[in-house]
């Protein structure tokens, strides 16, 4: 089989490394991929959002199955296009990807179907939003409706900060069209849990839970990033919480999307807050998380491609999806200065015995040498029998990878460890 993967980060590298384990896979194409993914797939420099470029590529190459990984091509209808070309795909159609593409849509969906989430109001008029903030409780969360590279959420600690966020989104158009409509919502407290799930629109199978570390600094301080590390499973996701999530969130969401004529097939990611009065949805993503995938897939014992095909063909109920009972920890190495400005082009050294555990995100080949080309450069994942061992091994491997200015958090997994020990 010849497989096409759309995307080019650490998540796609993890997906490709898992897919490669299937003996039926003869070739994997990755658009655009990156210099590290090129060790495992044939990369062609066509952007994930360049639907016309992807169409042309597919016309010239035999592709038996496609995986569309990032949010923007999904929201743009990449799966719809590939399906129309006769290619079976993993990923939702555009009409279902809207669950991530529009926060107004997802909030209204949850309200309509009684799925627990933060209380909210939506606005397309800036004056009304500013007037509402006069009486809104603080902290207040201001969210751009559309995709904003993960930066469209502002947690305002004062009314002035909230107003500034509204003005920057609606008047200054910081996120372009994505901020024309906004959601203002209640601030929720509690540990966060990421649950990625496989769903074919009939059955939903949660993957092993995980915990992201979004801030740049130790102790969850500093600016938000694309994610500085992950652990799986997440100790806050107890069996009792999992049962409530299935009954109150996962199954109702699948049913709601069906009732709206927007059947979701693919990976539906539930970003959850475990609040004192129960689990609530912080956000839905229409795709695998990054860097959650880098800890979840190494724990998947079943064959990924087989499960993905079962999702596409609506056979998920009859398909085994088994996870190991081990623990995984992924530590991200970023360029100094990320998430603001950083230099690129530094040679990366990875010992051969560590390479199988590495997922490359921001690197390219420059005259045969792998060099940094992005903010988050790579992630390294350890799988061990216990969480402390996984953390220790991941850091031991990270220590042996080098490039100039490499930055990593030193406390990935510390909060999870504390939860286990409490
Ligand atoms: P999102 O882009 O929706 O993933 O939001 C980014 C991050 O903002 C989440 O991972 C949460 O940590 C935080 N967040 C979003 N909504 C809320 C909320 N209502 N209350 C507290 N934190 C939130
Ligand atoms: N790690 C968060 C995300 O993928 O959106």
Image (cartoon, rainbow, N blue to C red):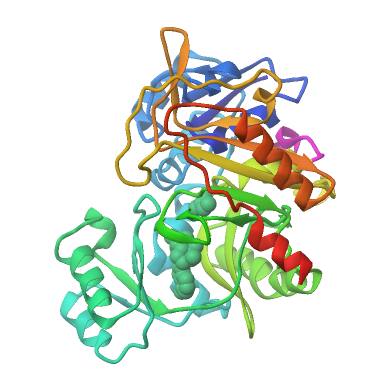
Q: Does residue 124 appear to the left or right of 229 in the view shown? A: left
Q: Quadrant of residue 98?
A: bottom left
Q: Quadrant of residue 47?
A: top left
The boundaries of the magenta stretch are: 301-311
Q: Is residue 13 above or below residue 73?
A: above
Does the rendering let one see residue 41?
A: yes
Q: Is residue 396 above or below residue 214?
A: above
Q: Quadrant of residue 251?
A: bottom right
Q: Does residue 199 appear to the left or right of 375 in the view shown? A: right
- What is the x, y in percent for residue 148? 34, 53
- Nearer the observer, 94 or 231: 231
Does the rendering let one see residue 311?
A: no
- Nearer the observer, 405 or 211: 405
Magenta stretch, main secondary structure, is: helix
At x 61%, y 19%, the residue is 40
- Nearer the observer, 8 or 156: 156
Q: Is residue 220 above or below residue 138?
A: above
- Nearer the observer, 160 or 303: 160
Residue 305: within the magenta? yes
Residue occupying the far bottom of the picture: 135
At x 41%, y 65%, the residue is 103
* Circle count: 0
- What is the x, y in percent for residue 355? 65, 23
Quick one: quadrant of the C terminus? bottom right
Residue 185: within the magenta? no
Q: Is residue 248 above or below residue 381?
A: below
Quick one: quadrant of the N terminus? top right
At x 80%, y 46%, the residue is 321
- What is the x, y in percent for residue 173? 18, 59
- What is the x, y in percent for residue 107? 45, 72
At x 85%, y 46%, the residue is 385
Q: Does residue 214 appear to the left or right of 172 in the view shown? A: right
């Amino acid at each position: 089989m010849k497989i096409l993967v759309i995307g080019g980060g650490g998540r796609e590298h993890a997906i490709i490394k898992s897919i490669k384990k299937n003996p039926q896979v003869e070739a994997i194409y990755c658009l655009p991929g990156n210099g590290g993914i090129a060790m495992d797939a044939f990369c062609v420099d066509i952007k994930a959002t360049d639907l016309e470029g992807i169409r042309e590529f597919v016309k010239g190459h035999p592709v038996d199955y496609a995986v569309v990984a990032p949010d923007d091509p999904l929201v743009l209808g990449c799966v719809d296009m590939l399906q129309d070309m006769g290619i079976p795909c993993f990923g939702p159609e555009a009409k279902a990807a809207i669950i991530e593409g529009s926060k107004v849509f997802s909030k209204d969906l949850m309200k309509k179907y009684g799925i627990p989430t933060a209380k909210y109001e939506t606005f397309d008029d800036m004056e009304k939003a500013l007037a509402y903030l006069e009486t809104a409780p603080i902290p207040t969360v201001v969210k751009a409706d559309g995709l904003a590279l993960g930066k469209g959420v502002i947690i305002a600690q004062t009314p002035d900060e909230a107003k500034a966020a509204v003005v920057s989104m609606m008047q200054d158009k910081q996120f372009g069209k994505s901020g024309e409509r906004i959601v203002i919502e209640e601030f929720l407290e509690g540990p966060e849990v990421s649950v990625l799930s496989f769903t074919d629109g009939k059955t939903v199978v949660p993957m092993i839970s995980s915990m992201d570390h979004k801030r740049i600094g130790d102790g969850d301080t500093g600016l938000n990033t694309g994610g500085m590390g992950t652990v799986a499973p997440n100790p806050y996701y107890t069996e009792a919480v999992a049962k409530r999530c299935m009954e109150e969130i996962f199954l109702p969401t699948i049913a709601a999307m069906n009732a709206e004529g927007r059947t979701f097939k693919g990976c539906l990611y539930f970003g959850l807050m475990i609040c004192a009065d129960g689990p609530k949805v912080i956000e839905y993503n229409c795709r695998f998380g990054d860097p959650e995938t880098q800890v979840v897939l190494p724990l998947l014992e079943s064959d990924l491609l087989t499960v993905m095909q079962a999702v596409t063909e609506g056979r998920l109920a009859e398909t085994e999806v088994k996870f190991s009972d081990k623990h995984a920890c992924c530590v991200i190495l970023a360029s100094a200065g990320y998430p603001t400005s950083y230099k690129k082009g530094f040679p990366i050294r990875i010992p051969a015995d560590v390479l199988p555990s590495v997922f490359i995100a921001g690197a390219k080949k420059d005259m045969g040498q792998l060099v940094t080309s992005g903010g988050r450069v790579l992630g390294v994942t350890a799988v061990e029998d216990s969480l402390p061992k996984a953390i220790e091994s991941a850091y031991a491997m990270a220590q042996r990878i080098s490039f100039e200015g490499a930055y990593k958090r030193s406390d990935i997994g510390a909060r999870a460890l504390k939860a286990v020990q409490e």
